Amino acid sequence: MTVSSLGDLATSTFFRGQHARLRSEMETLIQDLARNQVSVRDTALGGSFRAVSGLERSLTRLDAYDLAATEAEGFMDVAQSALGAIQETSEELSVDLLAAEASGTPAHLHALASGARQDFESVIARLNIDYAGRSVFGGHATDSAPVADAATILDALEAEIAASGATTATDVATVIETWFAPGGGYDSIGYLGSAARLAPLSVGQGQTVAFDLTAQNQEVRDTLAGTAMAALMESAAINSAPDEQIALARIAGDRLLNANQDQLRLRAEVGAGQETIEEAQTASQSERTALDLAMADLLKIETYERATQLEQVESQIELLYAITVRTSNLRLSNYL
């Protein structure tokens, strides 16, 4: 290789390096003007990132709280939906039960008992609902269904009624109420969750929402007891006594009417928690907006200054081209 060819190679390499640098600067300036924000932060901040880092930490913290609030919101929404469905089922069943005396034919009582059994299964299915793989009504135990299946509970009640020697609607109702009372069979056979309540749900800095409701709450026990009474209207103890079946339907209907009022209170408590979550999310969004504005203010650019710099870079590219074109046959459109 000749000396002149080595010189040409070095010159070409130099020009290519200069061209790459100027193109990079030009693209950065164009991007800055398009976004009205610096792309290279130390250009605007003089190499000091303390202010920006502080804002970024605050935004990251908000991201974590927003995620927690979203999860809490979903959890509470599922709980509210389940309670609403249980209340609706309970209300409809109580009306049918209290009307049983008016048309208490054996066929009607059979249909009523069959429907109540299905309602009992539906209530338990709602109590066993989960959110994102976590049981809602099982307290601290969120990894499994908190209530035994309907057949297991009704079979246990049938056995308890038979063992008690019950012969009247009042006797059957007493056995069922005792079984669902604290310390009764429900606590050892029916409820499979934890006695410990779920830890408060975090929704913001220093903000939590308590969710103390489990399938062991008295309001839930009362609803289950009333529905189970209706489902067991054809229990062997009173199966051949239509008058006692009607009497049990009336007791169950009254029990469910009272339970419905308590369910409204439970739903109001969950609703208060939902409102707290919404307020926390609104506050978080307001803080995020303020932080975004502060960040934009730190990184904003002087449009005139950037435009001037862009013109200077373009002039340098044109000059570099003019110098380069003397050593090779180039067109500006190809060069750029």
Image (spheres, rainbow, N blue to C red):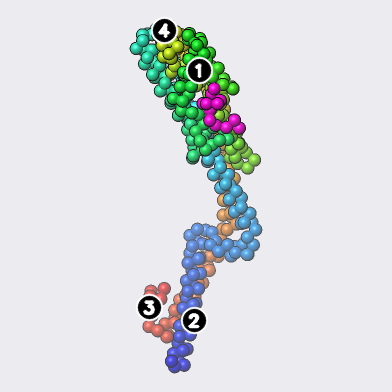
Circle number at residue 160? 1
* Contact check, label 4 and label 3, Cβ < 8 Å: no
Residue furthest left in the image: 107
Circle number at residue 14? 2
Which residue is rendered at x = 49% and y = 40% of the image?
132
SS at mark 4 in the image: loop
Q: Is residue 58 visible?
A: yes
Work out whether mark 4 precedes mark 2 in sequence or the reverse, and give the earlier one. Answer: 2
Quote the CA–CA distance across marks 2 and 1. 96 Å
Q: Type of residue at label 4?
A: Ala
Does 67 sit left or right of 327 as displayed?
right
The span picked out in magenta is 185-196
Examine the structure image and report whether residue 194 is included in the region drawn in magenta: yes
Quote the CA–CA distance across marks 4 and 3. 106 Å
Work out whether mark 4 precedes mark 3 in sequence or the reverse, and give the earlier one. Answer: 4
Foreground mark, 1 or 4, reads 1
Q: Type of residue at label 3?
A: Arg
* Contact check, label 4 and label 2, Cβ < 8 Å: no
SS at mark 1 in the image: helix
